[in-house]
């Protein structure tokens, strides 16, 4: 598929290393954040208002590559914190689906 694509963007250096020679039109675009945009206090999003603090957050796709046992154990060890995932949930996992300390936005 990479060989047939006109243009490919890759955000992981390891994938570029592994697959970069399969196409002449692969571009590495690393994930990042604008330091200027996030350097000061921001207004809290409305959907975070009801979530108790402190929060441990992750902005990503929740997929089969996550170590769900580790997440379950971290949540059990830190019951005073809320784990918040922002982004699409691509899988259901019985190890974490019923964790009261987990929120998905």
Image: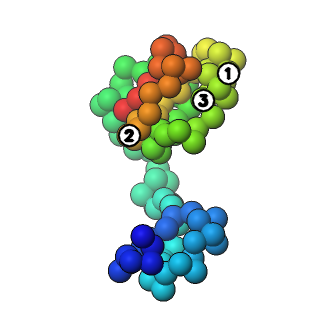
Q: Quadrant of the C terminus?
A: top left
- Residue 25 appears in the figure: yes
Q: Could you say where residue 20 lies in the image, as x and y percent from the top left? A: 57, 76
Q: Separation of disc 3 and disc 2 at Cα? A: 16 Å
Name above or below for residue 75 compared with residue 23: above
Residue tagged 2: 88
At 48% from the left and 86% from the top, the residue drawn is: 24
Residue 73 got which mark?
1
Please provide percent x and percent y for residue 87: 40, 41
Residue position marked by numbered label 3 in the rendering: 68
Rendering colour mode: rainbow
Front disc: 1 or 3: 3
Residue density around tag 3, few if under 14, some if 14–19, many if 20 or more, within 10 Å: some
Q: Is residue 13 visible?
A: no
Q: Position of residue 73 (x, y in %)?
A: 67, 21
Is residue 73 rendered to the left or right of residue 52? Answer: right
Give the SS element for disc 1: helix
Q: Are marks 2 and 1 in contact (CB under 8 Å)?
A: no
Distance from Cα at disc 1 to Cα at disc 3: 9 Å
Task: Relative to 31, say whether 1 is above or below.
Answer: below
């Amino acid at each position: 598929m990479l060989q047939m694509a006109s243009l490919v963007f890759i955000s992981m250096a390891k994938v570029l290393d592994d697959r970069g020679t399969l196409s002449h039109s692969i571009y590495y675009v690393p994930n990042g954040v604008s330091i200027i945009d996030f350097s000061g206090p921001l207004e809290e999003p409305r959907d975070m208002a009801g979530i108790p603090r402190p929060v441990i957050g992750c902005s990503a796709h929740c997929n089969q590559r996550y170590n769900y046992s580790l997440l379950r154990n971290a949540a059990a060890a830190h019951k005073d914190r809320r784990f918040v995932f922002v982004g699409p949930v691509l899988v259901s996992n019985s190890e974490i689906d019923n964790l009261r300390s987990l929120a998905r936005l």
